[in-house]
Image (tube, coloured by chain):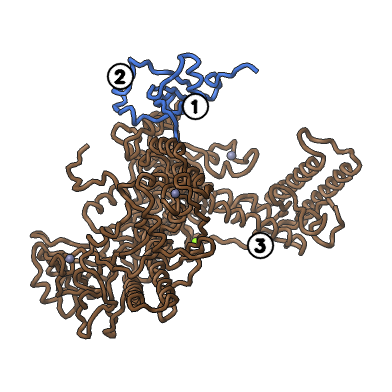
Chain colours: A blue, B brown
Amino acid sequence: MSKFNVLEHEIVPEHHLVPVDEEMSVLKKLNIARDNLPKISINDPAIKALEEIHGKLEPGRIIKIIRKSPTAGYYEYYRVVVKSVI
Amino acid sequence: MNFNNVSKRIEKIKFALLSPDEIRKMSQVRVITPDTYDDDGYPIERGLMDLHMGVIEPGLKCATCGGKVDECPGHFGHIELAMPVVHIGFIKEIKTMLDSSCKACGRVKLTDDEVNTYRKTINNMNFESDDPEIIDLSLKKITEIAVQRTICPHCSAESPKVILDKPTTFREGGIKITPKEIRERLERIPDNDLLFFGLNMSAARPEWMILTALPVPPIDVRPSITLETGERSEDDLTHKLVDIIRISQRLRESRDNGSPQLIIEDLWDLLQYHTTTYFDNQTAGIPPARHRSGRALKTLVQRLKGKEGRFRANLSGKRVNFSSRSVISPEPFLSMNEVGIPEIAARELTVPVLVNSFNVDKMKEWIKRGSTPRTPAGKYLAGINYLIRPDGRRIKITDQNAEINSDRVDIGWTVERQMTEGDIVLFNRQPSLHRMSMMAHTVRVLPGLTFRFNLSDCTPYNADFDGDEMNLHVIQSEESRAEARIIMKVQEQILSPRFGGPIIGAIHDHITSLFLLTHNNPLYTEGETLHIISYIDVNKLPEPEIKDNKKYYHGRDIFSLILPEGLNAKFKSHLCSGSRGKCEYEDTIEDSYVVINNGKLIHGTIDDESVGPFSGVIVDKIFRKFGPEAASKFVDNVTRLAVGFLSYRGFSTGIKDYDIPKDAISRIEEISNETLEKINKLVDAFRSGQLQQLPGRSIEDTLEVEILSETGSVRDESGKIASSYLGLNDPSVIMARSGARAKMLNIAEVAGMVGQQSVRGGRLNRGYANRTLSHFKENDLSAYARGFIKSSYRSGLNPTEYFFHSIGGREGLVDIAVRTSRSGYMQRRLINAFEDLKVDDERRVQDTVGSMVQFKYGEDGIDPTRSDEGETVDVDYVAYDEFGDEK
Ligand SMILES: [Mg+2]
Ligand SMILES: [Zn+2]
Ligand SMILES: [Zn+2]
Ligand SMILES: [Zn+2]
């Protein structure tokens, strides 16, 4: 069976890795500390798929997620990669 | 963030064991006598009510801090136990430690290698942040290894298995180990080994789990009460402490004068029993300690545990003052913003008024009136119940002291005034499932004993008047009154955050009434019109139509009187969507569409779609364009107009209204016979294997599906035949088509045929072996044997049908019971998860810690209350409102 890329599934929203040098500006734009960002487990299938492209991701990296919304058109969401989510 | 207003913040909480030394150190007195008060009622020194432990009687002073009753916080004392006893709360821990440590040398029974590796794993654990359950589990794994070992790896001594004889006795090879011996063993465990038992050596020593000294709680924790007879009654904790001291004393005496070992052991066991029940009087395995009356004592654990305990009764759930509860009943002549309260409640509930230079004269006047004033005509007037002096003392106002106190009152006093018309109160019906379950109303004092309100408020509260009760709270501060007026008032809650439409509107009869007033635009004489209009708050008459020199008025014009000028709307009425398939009014614009132009109803029928809750297009449009004030005024007028008109016109229904002609009945009979025949054919086809199997279904399922569709269509068909004889002259059809109550389906059941009964979506099939009732043949698959009811409610059901109907009806009841409890719990969990999320001024959603939940509320920043049924904005309506019907 060929490997399936979850990011290509229709109902999975776009996941992008925020480059390290843009992280500060993103946090500044959101006016928030990195710790307070919503979290995403490093074991999340979407992160595994991103690792196929960018190589191993360290906890603390920021992921930008673009979701479709019936009322807002597109909606940007950010998550910070964490080691494990309880 | 600004922490300046926070006087103290809790950074962390540390739990530790109290050592006997600490107990003695924090103790202000060593209690040695089991007595409380002497004959003069003065606390006995070194007794359980020693003044060093605090004061509860006015006039006395604390011997420790010198404070008076309200100043002294209370202080601990202690009891020196004659012999050590086991603390019931630590039984499990004591057992593990006895099991896994060596009896002789006290070391944990792990080899040096194991000690080294496990010490490392434990040091790597974070006791402050890791999941305590996981910590427990891994520690248990380690101690389990030591428990399994009988020979000590350090000194090679043998430790036999310790057995716990519940609740507090430990045995080793059948012989009891006394608490004293246990304590000695625990003392031998070196500090360094404590971490294997999950103990922090800086916070606890295991031998402290065996009590040698017992703290005596401050008197404030266990106050005695004086009964009306002058008798003193002690707190349950005090009773228990008396027992402990008494037995401890006897034990000490017996031990010191060398009594037989048997007596000493008995007393020691008794001391253990009393201390155990002092902590937890529901310990399994021992009888609870009781009062002379037979009532079980409420000791420490009982104070905290369960529904009546400190947590659920006092911390999570609180009782409030200034509230009342009564049965509710309807009053259409009240505004939706009002609530009628009975005089008896109004006289009991008070509002505090701070006396200042502006109101001092008025207040003096009010106080002079006493506590039960009335107008000369006997009407209710607010009286004064209490005065609160600047020093906090309360004075009860009676008719005797009213005059004097009126002179004494001055600026800075507070007057507790009874309810009066216009006061704002909070009104609530449980279960409080959404924010509209608690709304602010203004008060009307009415005769009678029930709370009353406008019927349009029934929907948000989900109230009816079959005995429902509601709660009412009187607001006590100026700020809260302002908040209640601005955000909690009923008129502010007309639009629901649940679906962005009105949740308040006309119900039942009111819809029927407006339907009758506007459908086909009937004419009314001047006299009739004046009578109807006298109910509503308007001061003009509509344009009359002159016929034979007499003035007549149109129903739609009368309704238009309560519409605000400037209102435009165009929408399909409920009447036009009332039946399945094509509706008979679809092609006549006048009947299918409600058109309102500049506050005038041009054509169309007013019904549920216009003014009902959940749909209420007119209410919705008025609220959005003219605001809450206008919307509430409209709904109030709708209620009055509807009541006024319907009480004039009259409206009722009865069984006769469902009479249909003979040939209709025989036609229904005919089609039901046809269906029975068809079903028999289907069953025959099934038995002979001729039935065409449906894709994805078994042959049995196929048969059931086919039969169900036959029974369904015959019910519809008979309903159609029946309702073709019942038109808009029929009261129940009026109710169904206007959306006031019931559906056309219900009418079909009454006049036509009740139809197939079902359980879990299928025909009835259980009961007796292979049949529903004993008089059917086994495996009879025909319609009658499986719950088909060909009778109508009007004609009546035969016994078999009646029984099948009960089976089908029960499913509904069970469903409701199961669904409400399950969805209620689900909702509770959601509420608890969301309750402290906060939307800030950038519309970001965060929790109390500051963790982001949504970067924009709802991902679009739109308040669902102000949305148009979920959509951001209704562009079509805005255009229609501006430009009208331009094509
Ligand atoms: Mg009820
Ligand atoms: Zn004190
Ligand atoms: Zn040993
Ligand atoms: Zn229609």
Q: Above or below — where is B125 with respect to B43?
A: above
- Alpha-carbon distance for marks 2 and 3? 77 Å
Chain identity of mark 1: A
Left or right: residue B815 versus residue B786 is left
Q: Residue at x 41, y 51 (%)?
A: B106
What is the quadrant of residue B501 in the picture?
Answer: top left
Q: Above or below — where is B114 with respect to B673?
A: above
Would you name the residue on which mark 3 appears? B656
x, y percentage for residue B790? Answer: 76, 55
Lower sequence index among marks 1 and 2: 2
B223 or B458: nearer the eye?
B223
x, y percentage for residue B553? Answer: 44, 51
Left or right: residue B154 versus residue B66 is right
- Alpha-carbon distance for marks 1 and 3? 68 Å
Q: Considering the numbered disc 1 on the image, is that residue within a helix, a strand or a loop?
A: loop
Nearest to viewer (mark 1 / mark 3): 1
Q: Considering the numbered disc 2 on the image, is that residue within a helix, a strand or a loop?
A: helix
Which residue type carries mark 1?
Asp
Which residue type carries mark 2?
Ser
The 10 Å Cα crowd at callout 1, few under 14, some 14 to 19, many 20 or more, is: some
Residue B198 in view, yes or no: yes
Q: Quadrant of the N terminus of chain B?
A: top left
- Label placed on residue B519: none
Would you name the residue on which mark 2 appears? A25
Would you name the residue on which mark 1 appears? A44
Nearest to viewer (mark 1 / mark 2): 1
Chain identity of mark 2: A
x, y percentage for residue B428? Answer: 38, 57
